[in-house]
Image (cartoon, helix red, strand yellow):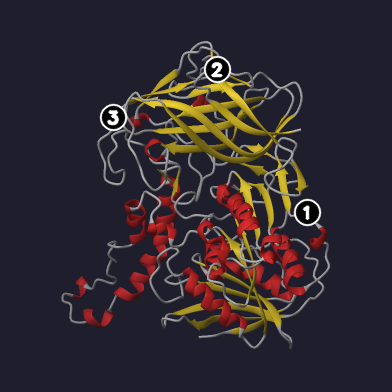
Amino acid sequence: MTNARSVKNQPASWVFLAFCFTTMLALAPARLHATENYEVTVERDVAAKMRDGVTLYADIYRPKADGKFPVLLTRTPYDKTGVLGFGLKAAARGYVVIAQDVRGRYTSEGEWYPFRYESQDGYDTIEWAAALPYSNGKVGMVGGSYVGATQFLAAIAKPPHLAGICPNYTASNYHDGWTYQGGAFEQWFNESWTTALAANTLTRRVDTGSDPLSWTDVLPLQSYPVRTAPSAEGLAPYFSDWLAHPGYDDYWKQWSIEDHYAEIQVPVFSLGAWYDIFLGGTLKNFTGLKKLAGTEAARNGQRLMIYVGGHAGGWADPKVGAVDFGSKLPFVLGEVELRWYDSLLKGIANGVEHEKPVRIFVMGKNEWRDEDDWPLQRAKVTRYYLHSTKPANGLGGGGTLSTAGPGDEKPDQYGYDPKQAVPTTGGPLCCEPLPTGIGPEDQRPAEARDDVLVFSTPAFSRATEVTGPVSLDLYVSSSAVDTDFTGKLVDVWPNGFAQNLTEGILRLRYRSSQEQPELANPGQVYHVSVDLWATSNVFLPGHRMRLEVSSSNFPRFDRNLNTGEDQAHATHMVKATNAIYHDRTRPSALIVPIVP
């Protein structure tokens, strides 16, 4: 059924989805620099039939005026009604906004399975939207997180009428950087996201599984069942499939974005955030598409904006986690998106065409900065070598960082017991905080443990900026056939507050390949690299740079049980003794880009 109504001069409306994994399209009560101010017509539950006969339903917000307008499409699993605020504002500004429930979610038909149908359904929906009588044939897409995935998966299908996409904090690969990272299972995200999305699946089962007519003969009347409890069997089959494919195989390659950059032929405005769970993918999408997108216009049309928070916090609040980043951080997301589309789809000369392609928020100094590219060409890759004059275990240890290479030093070792895993404290989380916080939080409770190695520089005498990719070059061994190694870059304030900046993990069996796992030989030394993703932070005078090395970050990542068994089914766990080597022939180092 389709309902239409006109809306004129209504205030901006904040409409949030059930949890933090939203499309992030509702606008703050801010002034849009619109050249038009149309009355708006809203049509609910407009049907679009896909190529296989499945019908998907959308809400359409459009100017109540003659003529044809560009389309902004968002395809979401989180309930299309959450786009109300953005739909009204953008339609008043001269866009047709289409918010569609993806297959198997809320009002749309079909079975929900992440990623599987988004290319074909995205293609079909874009071409359907372009042919609507009030569309001018130009279709752009907006939205974040999984709604960013629906954009990229549609773009690799090359629909003729797609003109651009604007994905906010989303991944480049749904294996590494979404479901797994460095071979470790993203347990907190995968379980909390699956549980949240299962609520709608259960509701759909309840709606289709009860039959009052069949119960009219039930005696005694007291036995009338009212409702039949839906079965939980097969509620989220994809979760089991994700566990069944721990390596990067054909299951993942079929919808990997970074393996299909050449198929993307439109400009992309990628937004992401420090402390966001998909930051690594956001940065990969920008750098990869600049080199590999399918047309010169697409390669030259890449833009990047990195703020603070993402899934770990918003863009309208200066405080993320335990840190206040100041009054310069907040911005109006919808205005940024619409301003870009005003330039791209309407040809409005609003200054976008003259701006640098990269805009980042520099933490520490807490200010925005425009750049010519990412990573920054002027950044100097610098190695901070690990040292210890006495065991580096915990805050009371003797671990230090220095640009001077190591001499003849003893390795540092620690015991890793999966039963006593290092708890996740803040960091890039989704879809809700843990009791220990989210985003930047004080790491001193973790650093007090003996199973965390702590290496710190002396206090900086002058401001020192780290902006760009960060990695950890380690020489390691373990008493186990498999274990994990984690790294975390920390900014230590003069008062002792230890602010986590970025982090990473490596499952040792995936040290050489994400496709071909290989168990380790106990006691053998391996040279490995741990990707800590990236950051932009100025270590102010009096602050210190710190590195934490351990073997767990739970429950953000699943615990490695150290047995080498299949992680999905293993229940047996053993303790491991893990070692980090830092000497003349095995110079373990933290690698950071220092900006002059």
Between 275 and 162, the one lying in front of the other is: 162
Indicate which disc, 1 or 3, sits on the residue closer to the N terminus. Answer: 1
Q: Which mark is residue 574?
A: 3
SS under mark 2: strand
Is residue 330 shown to the viewer in this render? no
Determine the residue positioned at 75% across, 61% down: 30
Determine the residue positioned at 71% across, 84% down: 68
Query: CB of mark 3 within 8 Å of CB of mark 2?
Result: no
Residue type, label 1: Lys
Indicate which disc, 2 or 1, sits on the residue closer to the N terminus. Answer: 1
Is residue 452 shown to the viewer in this render? yes
Q: Nearer the viewer, mark 3 or mark 2?
A: 2
In space, the residues marked 1 and 3 are separated at their CA atoms by 52 Å
Left or right position of 6 against 103: right
- Residue carrying label 1: 356
Q: Nearer the viewer, mark 1 or mark 3?
A: 1
